[in-house]
Amino acid sequence: MTEFDFDLFTIGAGSGGVAASRRAAAFGARVAIAEHVRVGGTCVLRGCVPKKLLVYGTQFAEEMEDARGFGWTVEGRLDWGALIAAKDRELDRLHGIYVRMLTDSKVTILEGHATIAGNDTVEIGGRCYRARNILVATGGRSERLEIPGADLAIVSDDALMLPALPQRVAVVGGGYIAVEFASIFRSAGAEVTQVIRADQILRGFDREVRDHLADAMENRGIRIRRGRKPARIETAGRARKLVLDDGTTIEVDCVLMAIGRRPNTEDLGLEAAGVSLDKRGAISVDASQRTTASGVYAIGDVTDRVNLTPVAIAEGRALAETLFNSNPTTMDHADVPTAVFSQPPVAVVGMSEERAAMLGPVDVYRTVFRPMKHTLSGRDERTLMKMVVDSSSQRVVGIHMVGTDAPEIVQGLAIAVRAGLTKQEFDRTVAIHPTSAEEYVLMREPVRRLARHAID
C-alpha cells in the first residue's frame, strides 16, 4: 500500500489555495501548503487589498475639495510615504492572520519553491512529499512588453511600494489594473497619461460604461492616448522618455506597465508531470478543476478563465467539497459580478448590451444623473446606471454602473441577476429615497429596443 504524507498538497498560498486547504482540513484531510514568497498571495499582499487602500488614501483629496461646498474649510497635503507605510502595516497584519488561519486549521505550511516531481510527489527544499492529490494555485504575474528599455518601467507590484509619489506618470494599458492605478496617481496629485492600443479603455465591458468612465477620467485630468503602442523607453536624466509607435514621446518620472497578467506556471514541473498548458501557459482544467494529469488539480488565475479572487476561493472550496466531503461541486462561472476601483468606480454583473443583443432581442434601460451630493459640492460628475433586459422573458440579464458606491450597490443586485428576476419584479420593489440605488427600481421606459444581432 502506498504511504502518503498528505491527502492534499497545495502549491501556492494565495486566497484560492488557502480557502481550498482550510476547507479540506475541516473535512479531516491531511493538508500541506507551500509558498515561496509570503502567505496571503497576490490579492492580499500585491493586488486587490493594497490597491484598494491606496484608492481610499488618495480619495481624500476629492472629499476635501467637495467639503467646501458644504461649508467646511479643509486643507490638506498627502504624505505618500506615510500612506505606503500604513498600507504595509496592514499587509503585515493580514499576512499574520492568514498564517494563523492555516495553523489553526492544522494545515502544514512549507516555505519554499515547490515543484511536481511525479504524479503524486512534490519536491520542496530538496525534500519530497507524497500526496494523494496535488493542487496548483500559483496565480499569475505581471507582464511586460518586449520592447527596448522595458526594464526601465515598473509593474503593479512595484507601484504599490514606491517610496515617493512620481509627479508625472505614464500608464501603459487599458484594463482593470491600468485604469485603477491611473486613478490613484491622478488623485494623489500626479500628472497622468494613459496609453492604450485600442480605441477605448476596459475592453470587454459594456461600451457605454467604457465611454462614460473614460469621459470622467479625462475630466479629472487624465490624458488618454488611444490607438498607440509603446515602441521603446529611454532615460532622460532621472526621467523616463516613453516613445510611441507614431514617433511622439512622453517624458515622465515613471512608466507603469499594466498590460495584463500571465499564469504563474513556470518551473513547477507541470509539463513533465503531464499537465497540459495552453499557449499562454495557463493550466487546462475541466469543470471539476481536474488537469490532464491524474490527481493534479488547478484553481484560480493559473487557469486564466475568470481571474477574480472570489472565483478562486469558490473553485477551491468546491474542489474540497468534491474530494473530501463526498459532495461533487463545481463553480458556476456565469454572471460573476466584478468591479473596477477606478475613480469613479465601475461595477457590473451579467451581460453587456452588446453581448445580450447577439443572443436575442433586448430592452435597454439607462439613466445618467448628477448625484445629490454634487448639487452642493459643485463637482461636475455624473453617475451612469444601466439595465439590460431580455425582451422575451423580461429577465434582467445585465446591470451596469459607473459612479460613487457602484461596487456596494451592484453586489446586492447581483443576487437578483443570479436569481433570474424580471424587470417587473424590480418595478414592484419600493425605492429607498433619497439614494442613488433607487434608480434601479424607478426606470420605467427603455431608452431603446434592439433586435437580435443589432450590434456588431
Image (cartoon, helix red, strand yellow):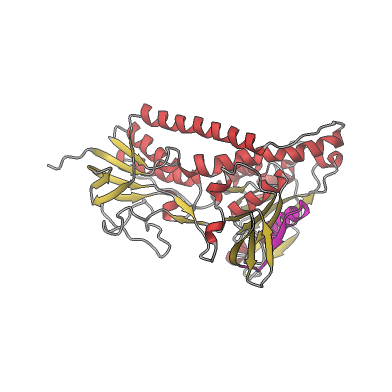
Residue 9 on the magenta span: no
Q: Position of residue 33 (x, y in %)?
A: 34, 39
Residue 227 on the magenta span: yes
Q: In the rendered image of this protein, does residue 359 appear above or below residue 396?
A: below
Q: In the displayed image of the protein, which residue is found farthest to the front?
A: 237
Residue 81 vs residue 133: left or right? right
Looking at the figure, which quarter contains the N terminus? top left
Q: Residue at x 57, y 57 (%)?
A: 257
Q: In the rendered image of this protein, does residue 358 appear above or below residue 289?
A: below
Q: Residue at x 20, y 40 (%)?
A: 4
Residue 419 vs residue 250, the one in the foreground: 250
Residue 117 vs residue 315: left or right? left
| Span shown in magenta | 208-230
Q: Position of residue 91 (x, y in %)?
A: 52, 34
User: Is residue 329 at least partly visible in the picture?
Assistant: yes
Q: Quadrant of residue 87?
A: top right
Q: Quadrant of residue 372?
A: top right
Q: Residue at x 69, y 47 (%)?
A: 343
Residue 272 vs residue 398: left or right? left
Q: Position of residue 429 (x, y in %)?
A: 69, 40
Q: In the rendered image of this protein, does residue 165 appear above or below residue 254?
A: above
Looking at the figure, which quarter contains the C terminus? bottom right
Q: Position of residue 28 (x, y in %)?
A: 29, 32
Residue 25 vs residue 160, the one in the foreground: 160
Q: Residue at x 51, y 48 (%)?
A: 308
